[in-house]
Image: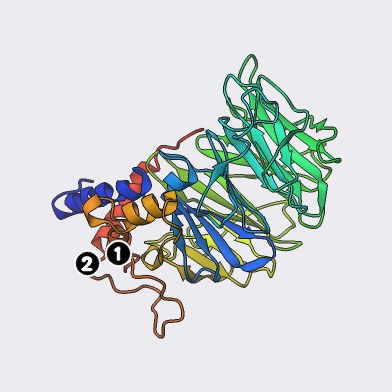
Amino acid sequence: MRWQGPAVAAVAVLLASSSAHANGRSPVTNGLYLRPGDPSSIYLQTTFGFLVSHDEGCTFNWICEQNLGYGGIWDPKYAIAADGSIFATTFEGLRVSHDGGCTFVTATSELKPGDPNRIADIWIDALDIGPDGHVWVGTAETGHTNDVFVSTDNGATFTAKGMLSPEIWWKSVKVAPTDAQRVYITGYQIAGTPTAYFYRSENAGGTWTPSPLANVQVASTPVLLAKTVDPANAAIVYMASVGANPPSGDRLYRSTDGGETWTEVLATSASIHDVVIVDAQKVIVTTQLVTPQSIMGGPSYQSTTGGTSFEPTTGMPQLACLVRKPDGTLLGCGANWDPDFKAVGRSTDGGATWDKVWRFVEIAGALKCAEGTVQHDTCDVSLWDCPSCGTDLKRQFGAKGPSCGVAGDPVVPPKKPDAGCCDAGASGPLSATWALVVGALLLRRRRR
């Protein structure tokens, strides 16, 4: 197949404009986070920064990468504390905002280099917040002695938890929702014989028990990720083995005894992103197709047997992420264009049907903060609405602001002539061509 004439020109314009607001990647949503105790707050991860809503997804305000403290083709891991503090992992340490996203600082940067509890300037790759509000992180720095740390004061200070290793990179940490003492961590080493590790603590890191990992298949780079802990049983945990189902898929394992034994329950064709326990019988797994140029939702899978077996789902949006609210509502990252026309979708029936929550065209603007902050001076003034700067994100998205609650708001609005490249308009030649471009890009998959 050859692309000729206007289609090629349209794709060239689209790629050129999208690179300005997504670091060369197509703009997509790829992660959702909730604030404990606040059902109205939704936090949205994208390839062009972070968005915050405090009205159940009606109004999303943008925080740019420069304020968060990272750049390039990089996707931080996030966690939200009960007081609204935002935590984000970066190559230079854990970034923390205690004012809703206006300012970020690097945790423990005030400590002197060499202090064993300094995690600034170190790649943080594992992050979770327990039901007691304690913040857990793990470091994964090359040429550094890595460890697992916990903060009991909302990120002000961190204490090492005895997993010091010059060879292991700590890749994930999960705390049981029903037991703050039960903590699971994973890591791997490349030096010598590549080896994967999974540990369990039942006393908040006082002691750690290794998993034998019998019958667990791993890739040549043996990365295991603790994905979720059952909200009703702290001994039931799900773990993904990254790249263990070639050429581009993972394997999902389930343990009912805290990692002493494992049973493979799913082999996927793409990278496992979220494992969401909907209820006692239903578990949904979402995947992502990842390349240096794009992230898209891959196949999703559903279990109706309590997570013991899975089947491909039907009728789901193209989910790149999924989260369950306390009331059972599901929120997912859909495709802003074809086939979903919803960057964020909502299901109130366990995933059977989905409604649009939000599209890129409805971005309310940059998060408003005081002059002198990076969020104001760079994100808002220089990047959001500055045609003369060449980085006019508002224009590129064709942003019209929130439309929720507007009478007659269509699910798929008509595409206006002056709409930006990211306007969630109706399907047409451009969106169809873009789908072909992304499809070609998905022949490759990035590995980290």
Total marks drawn?
Answer: 2
**Relative image position of residue 325 (x, y in whole percent):** 65, 65
Q: Give the answer, above or below, for where 189 lies relative to 201.
A: above
Pointer 1 local density, CA inside 10 Å: few below 14, some 14–19, many at least 20: many
**Relative image position of residue 267 (x, y in whole percent):** 61, 43
| For marks 1 and 2 on the same chain, the one whose residue lies earlier in the sequence | 1
Is residue 442 visible to the viewer in this orientation of the structure? yes
**Relative image position of residue 58 (x, y in whole percent):** 49, 71
Q: What amino acid is found at the position of numbered circle 1 in the picture?
A: Gly
Residue at the spot of label 2: 418
Mark 1–mark 2 contact, CB under 8 Å? yes
Answer with left or right where residue 103 lies relative to residue 306.
left
Pointer 2 local density, CA inside 10 Å: few below 14, some 14–19, many at least 20: few
Q: How far apart are marks 1 and 2 (CA)?
A: 7 Å
Q: Which residue lies furthest to the left in this view?
A: 5
Q: In terms of depth relative to the viewer, which is nearer, 264 or 26?
A: 26
Q: What amino acid is found at the position of numbered circle 2 in the picture?
A: Asp
**Where, by quadrant of the figure, is residue 164 drawn?**
top right
Kind of element beneath mark 1: loop
Q: Give the answer, above or below, for where 129 lies relative to 219.
A: below
Kind of element beneath mark 2: loop
Q: Give the answer, above or below, for where 118 lies relative to 131.
A: above
Is residue 435 visible to the viewer in this orientation of the structure? no
Answer with left or right where residue 429 lies relative to residue 325.
left
Q: Which residue is drawn at 40% across and 45% down?
A: 294
Instruction: Check residue 334 in the rendering and tell me which mark sits there, or answer none.
Output: none
Residue at the spot of label 1: 398
Q: In terms of depth relative to the viewer, which is nearer, 32 or 139?
A: 139
**Relative image position of residue 148 (x, y in whole percent):** 71, 33
Q: Residue furthest bottom?
A: 407
